[in-house]
Structure formats: structure tokens, C-alpha cells
Image: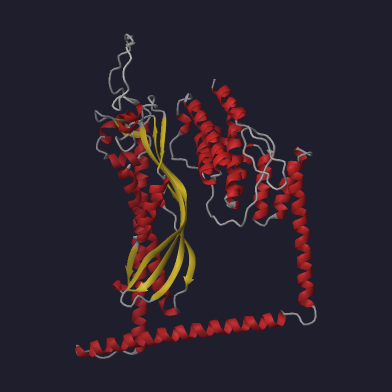
Amino acid sequence: VVMEASGEKENSNDTKEDQNDAANETVDNEDDKTSTTAGADDSSDDVLEDDDDGDDDSSKPKEDAEVLLIKAATCKDEGNKYFTEEKDYEKASRAYRRGVNAIKNLNKANTGDEQVKTLLLTLQTNLSMMQFKLEKYSQSQAVATKALEIDPHHVKALYRRAAAKRKLGDPEGAMADLKTALSREPNNNSVRKELAGIKRDIEMAKKAQKASLQKAFSKGSGLYNDKLEEEKRQAELAKQKKKEEEEALKKRKQEWEDECVKRMAKGEDAISFEDWDKERLDKLEKERKEAERKRKEEEKRLKEERRKAREAAKAGNNDDDDDDEMESFTEKELAEMRGYKKTKDGRITSYFTREQSHQIDIAPKPINTTPQPITPSSSGESNVNNNSYTGGKGKSSVWNHAGTWEEKDTSEWCRDHLKKRLKETKVEASGGSVVGSVTDVQDMTGEASVAIVSGKKRYIFDFHCKVKFEIKESDTDVILASGHLRLPDICSTHHEELEVEFNGWKKKPAADNNQLANDCQLRIMSEIRESVKLWVADFNNHY
């Protein structure tokens, strides 16, 4: 019945390719003709990644697959509506992505049945087109590649990836994909036109390169002028660097003079500038090593805690006689030991054990045929509101009596509060004389939701962003250095081990401040990890 219902939805929403050369834009309801869109340069760093929350989905009851297939088909129809009627590519992308995430575990290692594979291919090719329209060409290519992992000869997926590669400046790769697609469907006009367009691009690029070389080596070319301009620029940079070093030296000498005055006031001997500068550098190096030591100790402690939790979970799984010892674990420790929970009577049992909350009377009841007026207190809307996510922990709404799946999109709230937490990040170095802080959060993408699965509430999120930071003197607010950090994977499955990448300096520190700036940068990265943990706690408390 599910297969027929899904097929009817796909057939009813099937859209054919627009043959107009100026606009060739369709979404899949089945594996039909190939289509593409046009766009500009890619400006997004986000990539599609699996949102596996760590649970063993393979051990779920088989009947859950029916619910997931219906949910994925509904997401596909929702995405088609956003695309065809509202032209809202962001919402359409989110709908298709939810559909992919709903059924991707049904096709692990490409072992799903044909119904799952067909629906998954449709969702992924549609999602690839939406990312292309949003000018996220890297994302579009990645999604099309995932579709080709299911069917390496899928014409539409090959076409989508070729269009993305063309925008990313890889005409050879795009041509290879199109030739493969053309070998499968020799009469596909869209593939032929795209292949011809790429060939024209390559020819034009060769002509432009040839003309440029002819101009460069012709009489009166600008190569010599370019060399002079480069030498001039390098001279200006060297002059600027020398000026900054002189200013830094002047400032250090002023600090040295102040230190000598303090020593003489205490009756101590003055110190030479060379000895004072050496002491200053030794102190900075010592602070950096101490900060690095603390960071490594903290990472080692967290790693040891996780190891102990895994060992405890494994021991509990292999030996049922250890239940008495597990009674002493706290709720937080049990949460870290995935696969276990504590029942109402205090027993420790597996995650999949179900408890009957109350006795259900299944005896037949007489039906009251007397018409009743509809009042706000008896309407379904009131009941839904009373059973909303914010109304009670772990409760599902009235339309979902079975409690199999219910999800609420919390992306907007999570993005706003995550930015707020990151912007509050602030550290001190060199005894408080230097302050490092996050000044801006850029290019944040991703989604978050709260889901109730079989009566259990789960918090799901996956975000990516860039962070801009500055290092200043606390007294004068003079910026010593600034740079960018990248948070590529703020994910619900491993936020405790958050990866923070240093993308380089926007303003490089002076030579004498280099060690201090590096130390402050490491402290900022460590503090950002703590800020994300605080945001996760906010998320759990708010919903």
C-alpha cells in the first residue's frame, strides 16, 4: 500500500522538462528527463553531510521504514511546491534535504530496495538543482556525486554534476560526465547542448590565452611596466613593515624605561634593554606553554571520560549482572552511555525497552450519535497547542497518537543564539594586558530541529560558520592582530569534540608580538569550544 501511495504521489506531481533554450528548469517526481539551471559564482562553503545521530537505525523495527518512506515522499512534494509555486529555493532545499535524511539509512551500503533508491535519487537530484539555483555550486556537485554513488550511470545526476563543475571552472570534468550521460541517452538534447556550450567555452579560453600571449610578447608590451609596479609594491610593503617594527621597538623601549624607573624607586639596579626584552620573551613563551599544557590536559581528561563511558556501556551490554553497579550512574553519565536508559523504577535497561505507562481499556464502547457543538476546548487545535513541544517534555501532538515521528524546525532560534554565544567569546593573555575577542560570525549555514522519535525527544543540529576575531591591547584598544577561524561541523553527534580551524591572519602581528598573538589565538579557539557547549545547553533548556 505504501509503494502504491508513493507511486501515486510521484506520478501526480511529475513535471516535464521545459524545452525552451532560455529556461530549462524542472524538478524530479520520477527519474525522467535531464534539466539544469544557470547561476553565478559559488559563495558558500557548506557541504551536504550525513546527520547521523549515532543511534543504530538498523535495529529499529522494520515497520518504521513505511513511516520514513511516507515522510520522504511528503518532503519531496513539499519541496516541489516551494519550487514551482513560490520559487523559494531555500525552503525547497530544506524540504528535499529532510527527505534525504529520512530514508538514507534505508539504503546503507547501497543495499536498499528499488523503491527507496528511486525516491532517494529523485530527492538528491532535485536538491542538487536547488543548490545550483542558490549559486552553491560546490554543494550542488557534492549532492549529485552522492546520487551517483547509488546509480553511477544516472543521467540526471551526471548532468547536474557537470553543470556544477562547469561553474566551478572544471570544464574537463564536466565534459567527462556529459559524455558518460550521452552514452546512456544519445538523443538527450539538454546533454548535447550543455556539451556544445562547454566546448565553446574551452575554445574561447584557448583563443583568449593565445591573444594574451601575443600581446605580452609584442613590441611595447606591459610586462616591464608590470615588473616595475610589482617592485614598487614590494618596496612599499617593506617600508610599511619597517615602520611598524620601529614603532613596536619604540613602545618596548618606553616600557623598559618605565620598568627601570620602578626598579630604581625600589632601590634595585636598573636592567639593560636586551636583558629586559629577553625576560619579556621568556615570559610570553612560558605563558604559551602553560596554556598549551592546560589545553592538552583538558583534552586528555575529556578523552578519558569518554573512554570510561564507552567501557561502562560495553560492560553493561555484555553482563546483565552489573545492573546494581550501574544504578549509581547519574542521568548525564547515562546519556553519554548511548544505548542505555533508566526506567521509572530505577532499573538500567537498553534504549529499545518500552514501558506501558497505563492500562488501556480495549473493551468496545457505545458510540454517542448525539451531535455536539464544537467549542475551543474540544477542538483539535486546542489539544495540539496543549501538546506542543514547549508544552511538555517528550509529548507528541494529537495527530501523532502512535508517537513514531514528530519534528519541529528550530533553525532560526538556534542560528540567532549560536551567533550570540560565539560573539560573547573573550579571553585575556599576558596578565590581562592583551584581550582577544570574537567580533563577527559570518556565513552561518545549517539546520536544527527537535524530534520526537517513538516518544523520545532528540535534539538535532548541523551548522557551519566562519568567525572573525581581533587581538587588542586592553589599555589602548590598539589592534595587534586579527584573523579568521572556521567551524566546519557544529554537529549534534560530536559537538563535544568541536573542530576549529585557523584560516590565517587578516592583519599579521608584528615580529615581537607574534608569540603573544599565537598564544591568544589558541585561547580563543579553546574558549569557542566552551561557547558552543553553553549554546547546546541553552538549546536543550529552551525546548
| Residue farthest to the left, as pictured | 266
Percent x, y of residue 132: 60, 49
In this image, 188 relative to 30: left or right?
right
Percent x, y of residue 105: 52, 34
Percent x, y of residue 16: 67, 35
Which picture quadrant has residue 440?
A: bottom left
In this image, 46 relative to 170: left or right?
left
Q: Between residues 285 and 130, which one lies in front from this camera angle?
A: 130
Which picture quadrant has residue 200?
A: bottom right
Whether 273 is drawn above or below 168: the answer is below
The quarter in which the N terminus is drawn is: top right
Whether 360 is drawn above or below 450: the answer is above
Percent x, y of residue 65: 50, 27
Which picture quadrant has residue 298?
A: bottom left
> What's the residue at 29%, 36% (across, down)?
391
User: What colour-coding does the image apply?
Assistant: secondary structure
Residue 113 visible, this angle: no
> What's the residue at 76%, 58% (across, down)?
202
Q: Between residues 373 and 476, which one lies in front from this camera angle?
A: 373
The quarter in which the C terminus is drawn is: top left
Whether 419 is drawn above or below 188: the answer is below
Q: Number of labelled discs?
A: 0
Residue 107 visible, this angle: yes
> What's the residue at 32%, 85% (across, down)?
255
> What's the residue at 47%, 86% (across, down)?
243
Q: Between residues 486 and 98, which one lies in front from this camera angle?
A: 98
Q: Between residues 446 and 253, which one lies in front from this camera angle?
A: 446
